[in-house]
Image (cartoon, rainbow, N blue to C red):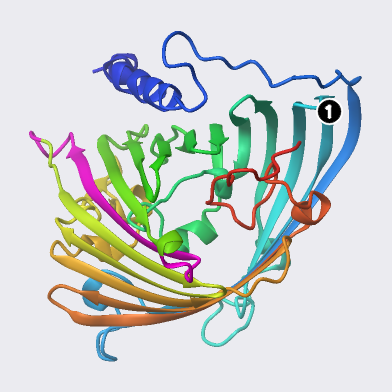
Amino acid sequence: MSKFGSFMKRLPAIAALIVLTAVSARAQFPMFGWPDVTPDTGSHKSESKVLQFDYDVDFTYKFDNREYGDGANSHAGGLEESMTVNAIRLTPWAGFSIVQSETLRHRLMVGVDFVHDMGETSLTVGTEGSESGKLSDFREFMAYYRADAALRRGQFTAIAGIYPLEELDGDWSKAYFSDYSRFYDAYMEGMLFRFRGARLKSCLALDWTGMYGDLRREQFRIYSSGEQALGGIFSAGWTLEVGHFASAREIEGMTDDILATPYAKADLASLTGWFDELSVREGAMLSYQRDRKTDSQARFPTGSETVLTARWHSLGISDTFYAGDDLMPYYDATFTSSDGRVWTNGASLYRGLGFYRTGKWYNRVEASWRPRISDFLSVEVAVDLHFAGGIGMAGWQQKATLILDLDALRHPGGVTYRKIRKHSPARPGENIAL
Protein backbone atom coordinates (compact mmCIF):
# COMPACT_ATOMS: atom_id res chain seq x y z
CA MET A 1 0.00 0.00 0.00
CA SER A 2 1.31 3.47 -0.87
CA LYS A 3 2.08 5.96 1.86
CA PHE A 4 -0.85 8.08 0.66
CA GLY A 5 -3.17 5.09 0.84
CA SER A 6 -1.91 4.26 4.32
CA PHE A 7 -2.54 7.84 5.43
CA MET A 8 -6.06 7.84 3.95
CA LYS A 9 -6.80 4.62 5.79
CA ARG A 10 -5.91 6.36 9.07
CA LEU A 11 -7.67 9.61 8.22
CA PRO A 12 -11.05 8.68 9.77
CA ALA A 13 -9.41 7.68 13.07
CA ILE A 14 -7.31 10.84 13.16
CA ALA A 15 -10.34 13.00 12.35
CA ALA A 16 -12.39 11.28 15.05
CA LEU A 17 -9.61 11.89 17.57
CA ILE A 18 -9.52 15.61 16.75
CA VAL A 19 -13.31 15.91 16.93
CA LEU A 20 -13.39 14.02 20.26
CA THR A 21 -10.92 16.41 21.86
CA ALA A 22 -12.65 19.53 20.56
CA VAL A 23 -16.23 18.53 21.30
CA SER A 24 -15.28 17.33 24.80
CA ALA A 25 -14.84 20.96 25.85
CA ARG A 26 -18.56 21.18 26.60
CA ALA A 27 -17.94 23.20 29.74
CA GLN A 28 -16.96 26.00 27.41
CA PHE A 29 -19.12 25.14 24.43
CA PRO A 30 -22.90 25.51 24.19
CA MET A 31 -24.83 22.28 24.55
CA PHE A 32 -26.02 22.60 20.93
CA GLY A 33 -24.50 24.28 17.92
CA TRP A 34 -20.95 25.18 17.04
CA PRO A 35 -18.39 26.09 19.70
CA ASP A 36 -18.21 29.69 20.81
CA VAL A 37 -14.51 30.48 20.61
CA THR A 38 -14.88 34.26 20.78
CA PRO A 39 -12.32 35.78 23.18
CA ASP A 40 -13.82 37.12 26.39
CA THR A 41 -13.55 40.80 25.60
CA GLY A 42 -16.26 41.78 28.03
CA SER A 43 -15.96 45.44 28.94
CA HIS A 44 -12.19 45.47 28.34
CA LYS A 45 -10.96 48.11 25.99
CA SER A 46 -8.87 46.90 23.09
CA GLU A 47 -5.22 47.79 23.50
CA SER A 48 -2.84 48.76 20.74
CA LYS A 49 -0.52 45.99 19.63
CA VAL A 50 2.65 46.07 21.72
CA LEU A 51 5.82 44.28 20.62
CA GLN A 52 7.90 43.25 23.62
CA PHE A 53 11.23 41.51 24.01
CA ASP A 54 10.68 38.21 25.81
CA TYR A 55 12.98 35.75 27.50
CA ASP A 56 13.05 32.78 29.83
CA VAL A 57 15.61 30.52 31.49
CA ASP A 58 14.87 27.03 32.82
CA PHE A 59 17.27 25.11 35.04
CA THR A 60 16.79 21.52 36.20
CA TYR A 61 18.94 19.34 38.44
CA LYS A 62 17.99 15.67 38.50
CA PHE A 63 19.34 12.85 40.64
CA ASP A 64 17.80 9.41 40.14
CA ASN A 65 19.57 6.36 41.56
CA ARG A 66 17.96 3.11 40.42
CA GLU A 67 18.85 -0.13 42.13
CA TYR A 68 17.03 -3.05 40.57
CA GLY A 69 17.42 -6.81 40.99
CA ASP A 70 19.17 -8.66 43.78
CA GLY A 71 22.80 -7.73 43.09
CA ALA A 72 23.50 -10.69 40.84
CA ASN A 73 20.78 -9.53 38.46
CA SER A 74 20.80 -5.74 38.05
CA HIS A 75 18.14 -5.62 35.35
CA ALA A 76 14.93 -6.54 37.25
CA GLY A 77 14.18 -9.51 35.05
CA GLY A 78 15.16 -7.59 31.92
CA LEU A 79 12.40 -5.01 32.48
CA GLU A 80 14.53 -2.10 33.73
CA GLU A 81 18.24 -1.47 34.11
CA SER A 82 20.08 -0.32 37.23
CA MET A 83 21.82 3.00 36.74
CA THR A 84 22.21 6.48 38.20
CA VAL A 85 21.03 9.61 36.44
CA ASN A 86 22.86 12.64 37.85
CA ALA A 87 22.45 15.52 35.42
CA ILE A 88 21.64 19.16 34.89
CA ARG A 89 19.66 20.86 32.13
CA LEU A 90 19.95 24.54 31.20
CA THR A 91 17.52 25.98 28.65
CA PRO A 92 17.73 29.70 27.80
CA TRP A 93 15.01 31.22 25.62
CA ALA A 94 14.74 34.54 23.79
CA GLY A 95 12.16 36.04 21.47
CA PHE A 96 9.32 38.48 21.45
CA SER A 97 5.66 38.67 22.38
CA ILE A 98 2.81 40.69 20.93
CA VAL A 99 0.04 41.75 23.29
CA GLN A 100 -2.80 42.10 20.84
CA SER A 101 -5.38 42.77 23.54
CA GLU A 102 -6.06 42.05 27.20
CA THR A 103 -7.31 38.60 26.17
CA LEU A 104 -4.96 37.63 23.34
CA ARG A 105 -1.19 37.29 23.30
CA HIS A 106 1.25 35.91 20.74
CA ARG A 107 4.73 34.64 21.50
CA LEU A 108 7.66 33.57 19.28
CA MET A 109 10.57 31.99 21.14
CA VAL A 110 13.93 30.48 20.19
CA GLY A 111 15.91 28.37 22.64
CA VAL A 112 18.81 25.98 23.05
CA ASP A 113 18.93 23.01 25.38
CA PHE A 114 22.10 21.93 27.19
CA VAL A 115 22.21 18.69 29.22
CA HIS A 116 25.26 17.51 31.10
CA ASP A 117 25.52 14.08 32.74
CA MET A 118 27.82 14.22 35.75
CA GLY A 119 30.98 12.22 35.13
CA GLU A 120 30.40 11.97 31.37
CA THR A 121 33.74 13.58 30.53
CA SER A 122 35.73 11.57 33.09
CA LEU A 123 38.14 8.95 31.77
CA THR A 124 38.05 5.67 33.70
CA VAL A 125 38.37 2.77 31.25
CA GLY A 126 38.82 3.10 27.51
CA THR A 127 38.33 6.29 25.56
CA GLU A 128 34.66 6.99 26.24
CA GLY A 129 35.38 9.94 28.51
CA SER A 130 38.06 11.52 26.36
CA GLU A 131 35.81 11.39 23.29
CA SER A 132 33.22 13.57 25.00
CA GLY A 133 33.86 17.23 24.25
CA LYS A 134 32.32 20.37 25.62
CA LEU A 135 29.88 20.74 22.73
CA SER A 136 28.43 17.31 23.51
CA ASP A 137 26.28 19.03 26.15
CA PHE A 138 24.27 20.71 23.38
CA ARG A 139 21.10 18.68 22.87
CA GLU A 140 18.53 20.60 20.88
CA PHE A 141 17.73 23.77 19.00
CA MET A 142 14.13 24.83 19.64
CA ALA A 143 11.72 27.39 18.24
CA TYR A 144 7.97 27.72 18.63
CA TYR A 145 5.06 30.06 18.08
CA ARG A 146 2.43 30.27 20.81
CA ALA A 147 -0.95 31.99 21.09
CA ASP A 148 -2.90 32.35 24.36
CA ALA A 149 -6.52 33.48 24.31
CA ALA A 150 -8.75 34.05 27.34
CA LEU A 151 -12.19 32.68 26.41
CA ARG A 152 -15.44 33.03 28.29
CA ARG A 153 -15.06 29.67 30.03
CA GLY A 154 -11.29 29.30 30.27
CA GLN A 155 -8.03 29.66 28.42
CA PHE A 156 -7.11 28.30 24.99
CA THR A 157 -3.49 27.79 23.92
CA ALA A 158 -2.09 26.84 20.52
CA ILE A 159 1.60 25.99 19.93
CA ALA A 160 3.48 25.11 16.74
CA GLY A 161 7.17 24.20 16.47
CA ILE A 162 9.61 22.53 18.85
CA TYR A 163 8.22 23.01 22.34
CA PRO A 164 8.68 21.54 25.86
CA LEU A 165 6.98 18.24 26.67
CA GLU A 166 5.74 19.82 29.89
CA GLU A 167 3.20 21.79 27.83
CA LEU A 168 1.29 18.50 27.37
CA ASP A 169 -1.47 18.45 29.99
CA GLY A 170 -2.89 15.22 31.32
CA ASP A 171 -2.77 12.66 34.11
CA TRP A 172 -0.36 10.37 32.23
CA SER A 173 0.56 6.95 33.57
CA LYS A 174 4.23 5.98 33.47
CA ALA A 175 3.16 3.38 30.93
CA TYR A 176 3.28 6.31 28.49
CA PHE A 177 6.32 8.24 29.78
CA SER A 178 9.00 6.96 32.13
CA ASP A 179 11.03 9.36 34.29
CA TYR A 180 14.00 8.66 32.02
CA SER A 181 12.19 9.54 28.78
CA ARG A 182 10.65 12.67 30.31
CA PHE A 183 14.09 14.00 31.16
CA TYR A 184 16.11 12.95 28.10
CA ASP A 185 13.35 13.34 25.52
CA ALA A 186 11.86 16.50 26.97
CA TYR A 187 10.63 18.21 23.79
CA MET A 188 7.93 17.65 21.21
CA GLU A 189 8.05 18.57 17.54
CA GLY A 190 4.76 19.47 15.96
CA MET A 191 1.60 21.14 17.25
CA LEU A 192 -0.41 21.39 20.46
CA PHE A 193 -3.91 22.64 21.25
CA ARG A 194 -5.01 23.00 24.87
CA PHE A 195 -8.01 24.24 26.81
CA ARG A 196 -8.01 24.91 30.56
CA GLY A 197 -11.23 25.76 32.32
CA ALA A 198 -12.57 25.68 35.85
CA ARG A 199 -14.24 22.28 35.31
CA LEU A 200 -12.67 20.94 32.14
CA LYS A 201 -9.20 20.62 30.67
CA SER A 202 -8.37 18.98 27.36
CA CYS A 203 -5.31 18.72 25.15
CA LEU A 204 -4.39 17.43 21.69
CA ALA A 205 -0.77 17.27 20.47
CA LEU A 206 1.36 15.94 17.63
CA ASP A 207 4.96 14.83 18.19
CA TRP A 208 6.84 14.01 14.97
CA THR A 209 9.71 11.88 16.20
CA GLY A 210 11.18 10.40 13.02
CA MET A 211 11.74 11.92 9.57
CA TYR A 212 11.81 9.44 6.69
CA GLY A 213 15.43 8.63 5.82
CA ASP A 214 17.82 5.85 4.80
CA LEU A 215 17.87 4.07 8.18
CA ARG A 216 15.69 6.49 10.14
CA ARG A 217 12.13 5.23 10.20
CA GLU A 218 9.27 7.67 9.80
CA GLN A 219 7.54 8.00 13.15
CA PHE A 220 5.00 10.20 14.87
CA ARG A 221 2.76 10.12 17.93
CA ILE A 222 -0.58 11.81 18.53
CA TYR A 223 -1.52 12.51 22.15
CA SER A 224 -4.90 13.40 23.57
CA SER A 225 -5.99 13.95 27.16
CA GLY A 226 -8.81 15.47 29.12
CA GLU A 227 -10.50 15.60 32.49
CA GLN A 228 -14.01 16.77 33.38
CA ALA A 229 -15.21 17.58 36.89
CA LEU A 230 -18.48 15.73 37.44
CA GLY A 231 -19.53 17.52 40.59
CA GLY A 232 -18.62 17.02 44.19
CA ILE A 233 -15.60 14.80 44.65
CA PHE A 234 -15.79 12.99 41.29
CA SER A 235 -14.15 13.55 37.92
CA ALA A 236 -13.53 11.50 34.78
CA GLY A 237 -10.98 11.73 32.02
CA TRP A 238 -8.79 9.99 29.49
CA THR A 239 -5.31 9.77 28.07
CA LEU A 240 -4.58 8.47 24.58
CA GLU A 241 -1.49 7.86 22.47
CA VAL A 242 -1.63 6.89 18.80
CA GLY A 243 1.84 5.84 17.60
CA HIS A 244 2.96 5.19 14.02
CA PHE A 245 6.35 3.52 13.43
CA ALA A 246 6.78 3.24 9.65
CA SER A 247 9.46 2.37 7.11
CA ALA A 248 12.77 3.88 6.01
CA ARG A 249 14.35 3.67 2.57
CA GLU A 250 16.39 0.63 3.61
CA ILE A 251 13.97 -0.79 6.19
CA GLU A 252 10.56 -2.31 5.53
CA GLY A 253 7.93 -2.57 8.22
CA MET A 254 5.17 -0.71 9.98
CA THR A 255 4.10 -0.98 13.61
CA ASP A 256 0.97 0.46 15.21
CA ASP A 257 1.12 1.41 18.89
CA ILE A 258 -2.11 2.69 20.41
CA LEU A 259 -2.77 2.98 24.15
CA ALA A 260 -5.91 4.49 25.71
CA THR A 261 -6.74 4.97 29.38
CA PRO A 262 -10.25 6.12 30.29
CA TYR A 263 -10.42 6.71 34.04
CA ALA A 264 -12.59 7.86 36.91
CA LYS A 265 -11.26 9.71 39.95
CA ALA A 266 -12.56 10.61 43.40
CA ASP A 267 -10.83 13.05 45.77
CA LEU A 268 -11.98 12.63 49.37
CA ALA A 269 -9.80 15.42 50.78
CA SER A 270 -12.71 17.86 51.15
CA LEU A 271 -14.58 15.31 53.27
CA THR A 272 -11.75 14.92 55.74
CA GLY A 273 -10.79 18.56 56.25
CA TRP A 274 -7.20 17.51 56.85
CA PHE A 275 -5.59 16.19 53.67
CA ASP A 276 -4.70 18.40 50.72
CA GLU A 277 -5.34 15.36 48.51
CA LEU A 278 -6.81 11.98 49.30
CA SER A 279 -7.73 10.45 45.99
CA VAL A 280 -8.32 7.18 44.21
CA ARG A 281 -8.01 6.90 40.43
CA GLU A 282 -9.17 3.82 38.54
CA GLY A 283 -8.40 3.43 34.85
CA ALA A 284 -8.66 0.79 32.15
CA MET A 285 -5.61 0.40 29.90
CA LEU A 286 -6.67 -0.59 26.40
CA SER A 287 -4.10 -1.14 23.68
CA TYR A 288 -3.93 -1.95 19.99
CA GLN A 289 -0.58 -3.32 18.80
CA ARG A 290 0.35 -4.68 15.40
CA ASP A 291 3.55 -5.34 13.49
CA ARG A 292 2.15 -5.41 9.98
CA LYS A 293 5.17 -7.19 8.51
CA THR A 294 5.23 -10.16 10.90
CA ASP A 295 1.71 -10.42 12.36
CA SER A 296 -1.39 -11.15 10.32
CA GLN A 297 -3.60 -10.21 13.27
CA ALA A 298 -3.44 -7.33 15.72
CA ARG A 299 -2.83 -7.79 19.44
CA PHE A 300 -5.02 -6.18 22.10
CA PRO A 301 -3.15 -6.06 25.45
CA THR A 302 -5.40 -4.84 28.26
CA GLY A 303 -5.13 -4.14 31.95
CA SER A 304 -6.24 -1.86 34.76
CA GLU A 305 -4.38 0.65 36.89
CA THR A 306 -5.34 1.89 40.35
CA VAL A 307 -3.62 4.92 41.90
CA LEU A 308 -4.09 5.85 45.57
CA THR A 309 -2.67 9.23 46.62
CA ALA A 310 -2.51 11.00 49.97
CA ARG A 311 -0.88 14.41 50.40
CA TRP A 312 -0.61 16.59 53.50
CA HIS A 313 1.20 19.87 52.98
CA SER A 314 4.65 18.96 51.59
CA LEU A 315 4.45 15.23 52.38
CA GLY A 316 2.88 12.70 50.07
CA ILE A 317 2.55 8.98 49.43
CA SER A 318 1.07 7.18 46.45
CA ASP A 319 0.51 3.57 45.45
CA THR A 320 0.16 2.55 41.81
CA PHE A 321 -1.01 -0.98 41.02
CA TYR A 322 -1.22 -2.34 37.48
CA ALA A 323 -2.60 -5.78 36.57
CA GLY A 324 -2.82 -7.04 33.03
CA ASP A 325 -0.98 -7.95 29.86
CA ASP A 326 2.37 -6.84 28.52
CA LEU A 327 1.63 -3.36 27.14
CA MET A 328 4.79 -3.35 25.00
CA PRO A 329 4.71 -6.68 23.14
CA TYR A 330 7.12 -5.55 20.41
CA TYR A 331 9.76 -4.08 22.71
CA ASP A 332 12.26 -6.89 22.01
CA ALA A 333 11.14 -7.42 18.42
CA THR A 334 13.77 -6.87 15.74
CA PHE A 335 13.81 -5.49 12.22
CA THR A 336 16.49 -5.75 9.55
CA SER A 337 17.91 -3.13 7.19
CA SER A 338 18.71 -3.87 3.56
CA ASP A 339 22.42 -4.40 4.37
CA GLY A 340 21.60 -7.19 6.86
CA ARG A 341 22.01 -5.24 10.10
CA VAL A 342 19.54 -6.17 12.83
CA TRP A 343 17.89 -3.56 15.05
CA THR A 344 15.67 -3.82 18.12
CA ASN A 345 12.54 -1.71 18.63
CA GLY A 346 13.19 -1.01 22.31
CA ALA A 347 12.80 2.58 23.44
CA SER A 348 12.54 3.75 19.82
CA LEU A 349 9.00 2.40 19.81
CA TYR A 350 7.98 2.67 23.48
CA ARG A 351 8.65 5.53 25.91
CA GLY A 352 6.99 3.99 28.96
CA LEU A 353 8.41 2.38 32.09
CA GLY A 354 9.62 -1.17 31.44
CA PHE A 355 7.74 -2.67 34.40
CA TYR A 356 4.53 -2.46 32.36
CA ARG A 357 6.00 -5.28 30.27
CA THR A 358 5.68 -7.80 33.10
CA GLY A 359 2.48 -9.36 31.72
CA LYS A 360 1.29 -10.08 35.27
CA TRP A 361 1.16 -7.26 37.79
CA TYR A 362 3.26 -4.31 38.86
CA ASN A 363 3.11 -2.22 42.03
CA ARG A 364 4.95 1.04 42.76
CA VAL A 365 4.96 2.87 46.10
CA GLU A 366 6.32 6.41 46.20
CA ALA A 367 6.93 8.59 49.26
CA SER A 368 7.80 12.21 48.50
CA TRP A 369 8.60 15.55 50.08
CA ARG A 370 7.77 18.67 48.08
CA PRO A 371 8.39 21.74 50.21
CA ARG A 372 6.60 24.91 49.15
CA ILE A 373 9.38 27.39 48.38
CA SER A 374 8.08 29.73 45.67
CA ASP A 375 6.21 29.84 42.36
CA PHE A 376 9.46 29.78 40.42
CA LEU A 377 11.41 27.16 42.42
CA SER A 378 10.29 23.56 42.79
CA VAL A 379 12.09 20.94 44.89
CA GLU A 380 11.18 17.26 45.30
CA VAL A 381 12.80 14.39 47.17
CA ALA A 382 11.24 10.96 46.68
CA VAL A 383 11.76 7.23 47.18
CA ASP A 384 10.10 4.65 44.89
CA LEU A 385 9.70 0.95 45.72
CA HIS A 386 8.98 -1.43 42.81
CA PHE A 387 7.31 -4.87 42.94
CA ALA A 388 6.46 -7.06 39.95
CA GLY A 389 4.79 -10.40 39.29
CA GLY A 390 7.28 -13.25 38.99
CA ILE A 391 10.02 -11.10 40.56
CA GLY A 392 8.70 -9.85 43.90
CA MET A 393 10.74 -6.93 45.17
CA ALA A 394 12.16 -5.57 41.90
CA GLY A 395 14.18 -2.69 43.33
CA TRP A 396 13.95 0.91 44.39
CA GLN A 397 14.81 4.48 43.39
CA GLN A 398 16.08 7.48 45.32
CA LYS A 399 15.24 10.73 43.55
CA ALA A 400 15.91 14.43 44.01
CA THR A 401 14.82 17.15 41.59
CA LEU A 402 15.22 20.92 41.56
CA ILE A 403 13.55 23.13 38.92
CA LEU A 404 14.02 26.87 38.59
CA ASP A 405 11.70 28.58 36.11
CA LEU A 406 12.41 32.25 35.41
CA ASP A 407 9.11 32.68 33.56
CA ALA A 408 7.11 31.89 36.69
CA LEU A 409 9.07 34.60 38.52
CA ARG A 410 8.30 37.12 35.78
CA HIS A 411 4.58 36.19 35.70
CA PRO A 412 3.70 35.49 39.37
CA GLY A 413 0.25 34.15 40.14
CA GLY A 414 -0.58 33.23 36.54
CA VAL A 415 -0.73 29.88 34.78
CA THR A 416 -0.21 31.03 31.22
CA TYR A 417 3.49 30.18 31.22
CA ARG A 418 3.82 28.38 34.53
CA LYS A 419 5.87 25.18 34.42
CA ILE A 420 6.18 24.32 38.11
CA ARG A 421 2.69 22.85 38.41
CA LYS A 422 2.86 21.73 34.81
CA HIS A 423 0.40 18.82 34.91
CA SER A 424 -2.41 20.51 36.87
CA PRO A 425 -5.36 22.40 35.41
CA ALA A 426 -6.23 25.93 36.42
CA ARG A 427 -8.13 25.86 39.67
CA PRO A 428 -11.50 27.59 40.00
CA GLY A 429 -10.92 31.29 40.50
CA GLU A 430 -7.21 31.09 39.69
CA ASN A 431 -5.69 33.97 37.76
CA ILE A 432 -5.28 33.10 34.08
CA ALA A 433 -4.39 36.60 32.97
CA LEU A 434 -2.09 36.91 29.98
Residue extent of the magenta highlight: 272-297
Identify whether 96 is placed above or below 28: below
Image quarter for residue 42? top right
Image quarter for residue 236? top left
- Amino acid carrying label 1: it is Ile
Between 426 and 233, the residue placed more toward the observer is 233
Q: Give the percent coordinates (x, y) of residue 310.
A: 41, 70
Identify whether 130 is placed above or below 199: below
Residue at 74 percent across and 38 percent down: it is 433
Q: Residue tagged by mark 1?
A: 98
Residue at 24 percent across and 71 percent down: it is 78
Whether residue 261 sits left or right of residue 141 in the image: it is: left
Q: Is residue 403 magenta?
A: no
Query: Where is the N terminus found, in terms of image quarters?
Result: top left
Between 278 and 351, the residue placed more toward the observer is 278
Residue reaching furthest to the bottom: 71
Q: Give the percent coordinates (x, y) of residue 292.
A: 18, 34
Identify whether 330 is placed above or below 104: below
Q: Is residue 301 visible?
A: yes
Between 289 and 332, the residue placed more toward the observer is 289
Residue at 64 percent across and 43 percent down: it is 429
Q: Give the percent coordinates (x, y) of residue 218.
A: 40, 34
